[in-house]
Amino acid sequence: MSVKTLTPPAVQLAAKADTRGPARPMPKPGMVTFRINGESKTLSIAPWTTLLDALREYANLTGTKKGCDHGQCGACTVLVNGTRINSCLTLAVMHDDHEITTIEGLANEGGLHPLQTAFINHDAFQCGYCTPGQICSAVGLMNEGQAKTEADVRELMSGNICRCGAYPHIVDAVMEAIKK
Amino acid sequence: MNPFTYARPDSVDKALGELRTNPTAKFIGGGTNLIDLMKENIEHPTRLVDVNRLPLGGISELPDGRLRLGATVTNAETAYNELVKTRYPLLSQTILAGASPQLRNMATNGGNLFQRTRCYYFYDTSMPCNKRQPGSGCAAIGGYNRIHAILGTTSGNADATSPTACIATYPSDMAVALAALEAVVQVTGPNGERSINFADFHRLPGNEPQRDNTLEANEIVKSIDLPAKGFTENHTYLKLRDRSSYAFALVSVAVGLEMAGNTITDARIALGGVAHKPWRKPEAEQLLVGKAATPENFQLAADNLLAGAIGYGHNTFKIDLAKRAIVRALGEATN
Ligand SMILES: Cc1cc2nc3c(=O)[nH]c(=O)nc-3n(C[C@H](O)[C@H](O)[C@H](O)COP(=O)(O)OP(=O)(O)OC[C@H]3O[C@@H](n4cnc5c(N)ncnc54)[C@H](O)[C@@H]3O)c2cc1C
Ligand code: SF4
Ligand code: FES
Ligand code: FES
């Protein structure tokens, strides 16, 4: 296969303008209260803290992973009031009063969540970095109740990238949990 | 991200007041585009005004048969809503072809309309870009422009150093179906309420590529209203992209038809991924009215729609791709 060279842009680099405007006083952090994994937590955080950073850096719940920080990988997936979202593209302050569930909150005294068990049974990971996001996403998928077939699972789990390529086993694990 | 303050008003008046008193304040819906752009140092609002607790939710039928989609309803709720699924399956299918389940759970109908281009140079603050920094030039012309526009870029726009050139595409899937359905955007602002026909909502770059749409400063989108006609029998959304899920469209086609037997009695064709706004051409649609649903007639409409398309090198393949996509989508919709 011949490799096509890309033409560089015909224009000169623009002088890097600082478009941020004049320096402004730093706004103060505010208090945010939400329930994380069933426990009420009040955190003092700045408005620009994402939910992901709030969980990892302020609530010390590092199970939720940061992959891309731009909504492109799904590693940061958590459940907000039972709905799966990317915690990297939302602000913690927007979730005042919301119920957040992370990977740490899925198991209970009765044991692992059925999806955690299914992931172990099917060896649905290799390095494990994407796994908390995959499992939270799969819990969200089951709450949504739209996925019936393997093709549905593939499509509706496409927001979670696995760099190790464990996809076939992930699909098996999710299918097992759906069928139960 | 730059520091900013945050407000969560509970009335539209308060929300509009926030913007009126602070010209660098911005609304935030799901945050899936705005927060990304703030992390990339493209947007720097000093105050974010959260619209999620405004009374702009809900999906409701209006007495005259229209369906009203609230601005703060999520894309996922809209796509899975029973009324949308049965009355506007084209819209449901189109929304589900975009982004990922997690993103659709966050993204709002209002925010979706305002998502900005995915042009690589728009995101790269070291490159010229008339949309990001008016007057600096367009790095995509003569640059790597595989995802860029082939329609609606006037010939004066062929010069990379022109202070107004822009060949960006508008990336929303949902908007392509809304164009085909002839939705109406309800907005309110300092001058009161107004309705904007979908064809007039997004704009071509013209002399102001920094402006994506015709919303005025300090206005807010309240709802997107769908006319009664839903093309429930004959419709399709065909999205062509580099991978089969979780990728933006290179070219997409939304088709809605009404048929009497094998004869087409009404036709709507909207294209995504080819222009600065969802692309429609009534003349091409008229070519199909009163005609039999045959590949030859589909081809005539496709050729007419793409007449005048301009390739910029890496994206020239889109001209043929779009024509084939139209023919295939019309075939699928008439089957
Ligand atoms: C990885 C990734 C992949 C994606 N893939 C696709 C895809 O394949 N297809 C697709 O169509 N989209 C895709 N998207 C884009 C996604 O659909 C948009 O980001 C989303 O729809 C934006 O909605 P939001 O509510 O999150 O907007 P926000 O980010 O909250 O806001 C966007 C803009 O809208 C303004 N705004 C919000 N609400 C209102 C209102 N009511 N009135 C006036 N202004 C308002 C805000 O001020 C802001 O400027 C993708 C996004 C990501 C991150
Ligand atoms: S195509 Fe538009 S958005 Fe992209 S670099 Fe050119 S001016 Fe900027
Ligand atoms: S870290 Fe949030 S999607 Fe990648
Ligand atoms: S198991 Fe390694 S990224 Fe998925």
Image (cartoon, coloured by chain):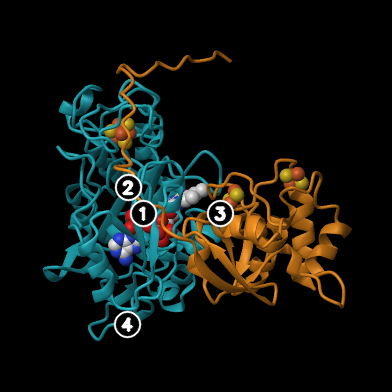
Query: Of the residues shown, which amino acid type is indicated by label 2?
Result: Leu
Query: Of the residues shown, which amino acid type is indicated by label 1?
Result: Ala
Do discs 3 and 4 share a chain? Answer: no
In the rendering, which numbered label is found on residue B61? 4
Mark 4 residue CB less than 8 A from any atom of ligand 1: no
Give the residue number, with chain letter if any, for mark 3.
A88
Picture coordinates of residue B144, whole percent (x, y): 40, 25
**C-alpha separation, residue under disc 3 versus residue under disc 4:** 35 Å
Q: Residue at x 31, y 76 (%)?
A: B67
Q: Residue at x 63, y 54 (%)?
A: A76
Camera-side residue of A77 and A33: A33
State if disc 1 and disc 2 touch (CB < 8 Å).
Answer: yes
In the picture, which quadrant includes the C terminus of chain A?
Answer: bottom right
Classify 10 Å Cα crowding around label 2: few (below 14), some (14-19), many (20 and above): many
Give the residue number, with chain letter if any, for mark 1.
B254
Classify 10 Å Cα crowding around label 3: few (below 14), some (14-19), many (20 and above): many
Residue B285 placement, left or right of B108: left
